[in-house]
Image: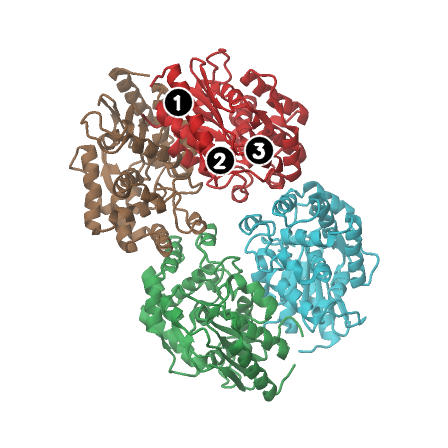
Chain colours: A red, B brown, C green, D cyan
């Protein structure tokens, strides 16, 4: 189903207006102290279609903490570095558990279920770190995002990184636990340092949607013509986003929205309509599963309106 | 991506030829004694596209025990009967556990994770049974499949049903466990009787692919014009098939094949390429997660060749 | 530490008086409907020492549903029938879980942790049943208790048995689950029938304390001179009572009371002071772990007062 | 049952001889590299009775790494410091899990099941540490053991402490996990440092048996006359040793040996025969549950021979 630029712009504008007014906004994450200060009334959306047309609404240019959305990009980087050997360290099945559960690690001898739960993303970060200094690895991740978003102004929010480093005991438990099974190669403190920092990258909806274009278009940015990864790898990353991208709410997101997507506890969601558009939304209030409450509703509305569900018209 | 009838026919034929020869065939399910007698060399495939063109290969007309594939149709029926109230009895998240796990039921007070694990399908069966005699409920399920497949010769394999009824202690445990939490309304023995019998329905690939057409085409059979369910409900059932249709191998199936699908331990898989085709494959040997080994490989090959992945070209 | 008959009688009388008055009485079990009707103000106690002197207080002659206390006697019977081969079917470790948990069964392939959680007692019942009709097995259990208590008037409360048989879905789940792993030999419905009935035996504190004497005195009733089991086996059953006799409150019971004991959800507790006394208490109100609230307090008081803890003076 | 000095000496001597010859010796712990170098042929035993008579056999004066046996003494210290408030941080129920399991911590919000599993002992260590520097806390623990053993030559084996500090990722996971729930007050690295060091204290069987006398004699060393704790507290610590002292083999130890005891992965066991004796054995080879294989057998033989079981003659 194709659309005109005007149709997309109107849909995005109306969704942004509706979302700014809604009284139900979820609860801002409080377990990273620095994130708890964000205003729950913020809402932003940016959509970029195949022709590179950009439709935005609300706070589309306000930077926010991308948090777990960075896991999509570290997965992409790590697959580029070690290919399918990555799957020796991490699975690709939904976990059926909250994002920071440690139970499954005990049952499955330290191998995390997928690259999008915390344990899995820490294992992926460890792969990127191998052979490098933490600073170099982090620089590589940041430059990759700047390249994808075509914006060298993207930075790490050091206050958020420091806040999580001070309080991220659950992640330290996950990392030490995997280390005890030999799943991590690097010193735990290094791997965690890189992990906390790449989760603390700040981006706007516009930047995120730009960065995600290659996933919507067979691994290639259709505007710049840059090929980031193969078409097959793009499909596969999308598949993992669909089955695992929203922690223990992944099934519900697929059921309601019908697009591959990855959420972060900063309230952002990057969603991919294959062959159609790259979409980023942001609203800081979260639902019980830790996903942006209004972000999900906005995507559900947009997908239905544009007929973009991957599960049928 | 459109295709000619010749292209599809050739793809199906070549896949069937390749699959008949492969030495790696998985292991035939042995926990239902009656299923253990099936010849592992069988392979069948049937594909029906939007225009109603049918391409078949191998044993496309041999009936086999559809087992858990029946859960797609009982879910469809139950949603038609009670609508979204169904979700009070069963979730729609991947389980992260084998198909017959009872652990999650204890943690989540008897509510199964999704309608495609055994516990969930038993709960769905209980909804269909309510207000009816077991025989009536079973008749309704069978007639629904005969209608969808346009073939009134479809029957229940009583030997398989009896075999499972004699040995299905794990399912009896699941049912009694849910009953202890009040999740089932009917006597356990009735609900299990209907469940074992609808899993024992025998169908061929051709019949299954015909029956699945409404899921590929917005809830409607494009050939007969019959509307079975709304377009939105078809999308949603597809979403659940994608995230939960292959037990603890659902993530891997999405990653490799990229289509919504539902497997059964009889070796069948029903897969849906939205807007393109309804597909059924059958090969009795299973992989470690209990899904048809060659069936999955055949679907992976077909999807790549036809460009049918829902995750991008 | 020896005592005079007068000292023991006074202690028991004062404890009974104190317990009748206390306002905190726990909650009467409601998951077996028939038990929910018992008056929470009841309290009974009976103590029989080495010389056979009996001290009683309160409702010491009122019969109550012994429920899980019967598991001590079925364990004794089964060990007499098959000896240490019993331990192929059931472990002897504390479970760290509530009495009716099914999680551990999944992890440990259907082998219950110990003979005093429900699953374990069902497995023990199945051993007693083997080679017999349910009616015969049940008769044997009942006659064993009548013999131990020297009272042929002891009967099964059929209303309680029927009540549990109608509502015991959780136990049916456990039994079917074990059956699926081959841990039970007999038809599930037979084993459960015997299990529900022996749990429904009604006894008074006086009868129970009499029946428990062999455990306090090296396997032998010191009054009648009857040897029931060897001294070593008596020690071992006491050890299992200590570590597993109060479900997930066993550690706390050992910590507070310091005697081997077995509780039932009818509110009874049988406790053993090795070399000193056999003790039965009854108060229907239960604590959070399903053990008699005042029964435990009465035993704690008695043990401290008489210096009977097995863990030191 | 009283005994002569000669009877006890002969029993101990014969047990030591038998144990030195046995071919079945278990496997020396290898997960702390420094412990893996210990000779599996070592065996020592020391028994001190009420009169202070000491019977020894084998390598009774060879120091070994006491490992988890230190948990008995840190529990005693912590109870002396904060009394029953300790039980807000740690439970006293058997865990039903291996010594280093993290699953239960997730289910029970960071509160370890008992003070003798690793997580519980780390929480107890954190209590002792509070308000002190790690060096001071460690000094206090060491001096307490020197005082109890009446031997100021007892030291920490720094090589073992360093070895565990380098490799103790599982314990670091447990500590961070508890910290994430607020169960630990001090910096994780401090608490772990003290924990690893007190586990690395080296003592001989003679020193350990001396140190344990207060537990066998109502909180008081009957030879020196020093009162360490109240009689009630001694009973209670014995109760916890009985139900939780051998990890997931506690039930079996109670069943076979019938004494409160605490094992360490260094191969030592401290056992308490209330009112009779304090006993220490050492043999480095472990069984599947991580407890000294020959140590348990030696204690079983000694207890049976001397009639010391707390569960009856």
Could you classify mark 3 by the number of other residues whose Cα lies within 10 Å: few (under 14), some (14-19), or many (20 or more)? some
Which mark's residue is nearer the viewer, 3 or 2?
3
Q: Is residue C7 left or right of residue B41?
A: right
Give me the C-alpha separation between circle 3 and circle 2: 15 Å
SS for dot 1:
helix
| Mark closer to the chain start, 3 or 1 | 1
Which callout, 1 or 2, points at the residue further toward the start of the chain?
1
The chain ID associated with circle 3 is: A
Q: Residue at x 45, y 37 (%)?
A: A249
Left or right: D3 with respect to C128?
right
Could you tell me which residue is drawn at 29 percent across and 42 percent down?
A: B35
C194 lies above or below B209: below
Q: Give x and y (percent) for residue A308.
A: 37, 24
Most foreground residue, D285 or C272: C272
Q: Which residue is mark 3?
A: A38
In the structure shown, which secondary structural element does the residue marked by tag 2 occupy?
A: loop
Disc 2 designates what residue?
A291
The residue wearing badge 1 is A11
Q: Quadrant of residue C272?
A: bottom right
**For the point 42% across and 41% down, which residue is it?**
B95
**Disc 3, disc 2: CB below 8 Å?**
no
Q: Residues within 10 Å of mark 2 (few under 14, many from 20)?
A: many
- Left or right, B188 with respect to A267, comes to left
């Amino acid at each position: 189903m194709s659309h005109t630029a005007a149709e997309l712009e109107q849909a995005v504008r109306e969704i942004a207006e509706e979302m700014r007014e809604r009284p139900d906004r979820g609860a801002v994450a409080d377990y990273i102290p620095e994130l708890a200060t964000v205003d729950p009334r913020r809402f932003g959306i940016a959509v970029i279609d195949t022709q590179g047309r950009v439709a935005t609404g609300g706070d589309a240019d306000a930077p926010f903490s991308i948090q777990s959305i960075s896991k999509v990009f570290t997965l992409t980087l790590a697959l580029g570095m070690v290919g399918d050997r990555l799957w020796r360290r991490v699975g690709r099945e939904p976990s059926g558990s909250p994002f920071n559960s440690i139970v499954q690690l005990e049952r499955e001898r330290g191998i995390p279920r997928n690259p999008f739960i915390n344990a899995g993303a820490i294992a992926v970060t460890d792969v990127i770190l191998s052979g490098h200094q933490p600073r170099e690895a982090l620089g590589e991740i940041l430059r990759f995002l700047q390249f994808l978003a075509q914006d060298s102004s993207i930075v790490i929010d050091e206050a958020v990184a420091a806040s999580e480093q001070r309080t991220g005991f659950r992640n330290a438990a996950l990392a030490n636990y995997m280390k005890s099974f030999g799943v991590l190669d690097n010193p735990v403190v290094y791997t965690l340092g890189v992990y906390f920092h790449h989760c603390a990258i700040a981006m706007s909806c516009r930047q995120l949607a730009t960065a995600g274009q290659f996933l919507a278009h067979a691994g290639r940015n259709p505007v710049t013509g840059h090929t980031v990864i193969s078409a097959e790898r793009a499909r596969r990353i999308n598949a993992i986003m669909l089955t695992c991208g929203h922690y223990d709410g992944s099934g519900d997101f697929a059921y309601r929205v019908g697009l591959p997507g990855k959420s972060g506890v900063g309230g952002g969601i990057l969603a991919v309509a294959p062959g159609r558009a790259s979409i980023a939304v942001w609203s800081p209030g979260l639902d019980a599963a830790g996903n942006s409450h209004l972000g999900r509703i906005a995507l559900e509305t947009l997908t239905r309106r544009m007929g973009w569900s991957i599960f049928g018209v």
